[in-house]
Amino acid sequence: MGAVKFEGVDVLDFLGKVVELHTQHYKDDFDIDKELIQNLAACRNGENEQLLWMSRTCGTYCLWERDVYLQDSHENKVWRFYHEQTKDSILAYAIQLDGIQDGKVTGCIWPLDYHAHVERVKLLSCAIEKVSVLFQDGTQAVFPYDSYIQQINMFKAEHGTSKCVTWLPESERELQTILRREHVKRDYHAKPGDIQEYMDSLKKSTLRGKLKEVQAVAAFTRKPPSHKKEPER
């Protein structure tokens, strides 16, 4: 199947179906993803509407695309890890959130070639220069990237734990240019897809999908129990 995109879809329903077919353990991860996606769709905050999501055999991850393209950020390390360090089967997607309609999170979803995408991220990632941290008492501080962990620990005693960490690249303009080009390239090569056809293809290629098919066939072909009375001995 060539590059496809699914426009105007129920995002959580789509991802939930992927989880059911592919994620075997730690499905509770998806509950965290759903809460994040619902909150972002409700507030509609520009760059935060662009997400990367993966389904693994053991759990899921939902990450801001912007942060994945920043060298050595937490998100960058997570996205690269399963390509570089494990042999896990990964289904990966780019997501553009449109908002909430009739109580459902809607958006556009692009299935990704996970391993090829990681290699592109490695080539295009921008260096982090500073880290902006919001503390529990409302204090906002900016630290140099190479010492931010020590600085956060020093601030904790007076300002509480860190509530939000924002990576600041050496060049925000460069980062935004990379992201725009990636979005255009991704969208240009993708054709509108049929969700049911896509899910059917996953059933044939994923372990859980194959198991469900076997169980369905077995249930259909199983002979009904015989009600004939056994002859008396």
Image (spheres, helix red, strand yellow):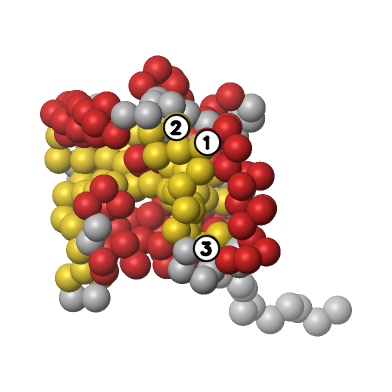
Near-viewer residue (166 or 75): 166
On residue 161, the disc is none
Amino acid type, label 2: Glu
Q: How many marks?
A: 3
Q: Could you tell me if the residues under marks 3 and 1 are in contact, i.e. CB atoms within 8 Å?
A: no
Task: Please say if 170 is above or below 44.
Answer: above
Residue located at (75% from left, 78% from top): 231
What residue sits right under mark 1 in the picture?
145
Give how far apart the Cα atoms at labels 2 and 1 are. Answer: 5 Å
Q: Could you tell me if the residues under marks 2 and 1 are in contact, i.e. CB atoms within 8 Å?
A: yes
Residue located at (23% from left, 61% from top): 44
Give how far apart the Cα atoms at labels 2 and 3 are. Answer: 20 Å
Label 2, secondary structure: give it: strand
Amino acid type, label 3: Phe
- Taking 155 as reference, is 144 left or right? left
- Of the two numbered discs 2 and 3 on the same chain, state the one appearing first in sequence: 2
Residue located at (17% from left, 70% from top): 101
Q: Quadrant of the C terminus?
A: bottom right
Q: Residue placed farthest to the top in the image?
A: 123
- The location of residue 24, given as percent across then percent down, is 59, 52
Residue located at (24% from left, 31% from top): 173
- Taking 169 as reference, is 209 left or right? right
- The location of residue 152, given as percent across then percent down, is 61, 51
Q: Quadrant of the N terminus?
A: top left
Residue 147 in view: yes
- The location of residue 199, given as percent across then percent down, is 34, 47
What residue sits right under mark 3 in the picture?
135
What residue sits right under mark 2 in the picture?
129
Q: Could you tell me if the residues under marks 2 and 3 are in contact, i.e. CB atoms within 8 Å?
A: no
Label 3, secondary structure: give it: strand
